[in-house]
Amino acid sequence: KTMPSLHHYCTCNKPTTRSEWAASIAVCLFVTMAILQVGIAVGILPSNIVWGGATDELTFRVSMASLVASAILCGMAYIIHRRAFLSQPSPFVRGVSWFITAYMALNTLGNVLGKTWVEQYVFGSMTAILSICSFIVASSSSSDEHASPEERTSTTPYGSME
């Protein structure tokens, strides 16, 4: 028996609904923010553009915090994508998508009140858009009536999280 290809696990569907478009935009922004956090963690970007401008030097602790933030942002992208593109998302995915929506709204407030212009305008704008996109995805209804039987079956080893 051969292993399924990567394409089997990563089906990149073209967005057709409002929630799918919102999820696609959100995933792009989450990944962009995750890449920025990695840039901060490795010293390519200055560390004072995040965390409220609280640190001017890159310490091990700041690097680790940025890497953890990057992983969390990638997890948020995954959940929002799953919520939009699954025909019947689990209660876990639905609940976490609402948590992400609330978190991004609070994060927007924190960024707008930040001390640096990067936080206020760049990250504030990004998290505001993420709040709106996450809300659109979290509040969307299930698209089960449009799903094919193949879309209803789990294609991941994590079927219980879908």
Image (tube, rainbow, N blue to C red):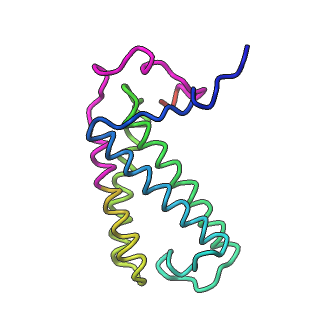
For the N terminus, the image quarter is: top right
Q: Residue at x 44, y 49 (%)?
A: 27
Percent from the top left, x then y, of residue 46? 57, 80
- Residue at the outermost bottom position: 56
Q: Is residue 135 above or below residue 38?
A: above
- Say above or below: 20 vs 114: above
Residue 130, horizontal then vertical, whole percent: 35, 56
Location of residue 19 in the rendering, given as x and y in whole percent from the top left corner: 30, 40
Magenta span includes 155: yes
Where 49 falls versus 93 (above or below)? below
Q: What residue occupies the far right of the structure in this picture? A: 1
Residue closer to the observer: 5 or 161: 5
- The residue under the point 35% across, 75% down is 121
Image quarter of residue 114: bottom left
On screen, residue 103 versus residue 4, left or right, reads left
Residue at the location (32% across, 43% down)? 21
| Residue in view at x 63 percent, y 84 percent | 57
Whether residue 128 sits left or right of residue 51 in the image: it is left
Total number of numbered labels? Answer: 0
Q: Is residue 151 magenta?
A: yes
Residue placed most toward the observer, 54 or 148:
148
x and y percent of residue 24 in the render? Answer: 39, 46
Is 71 situated above or below 80?
below
- Residue range (magenta): 132-159
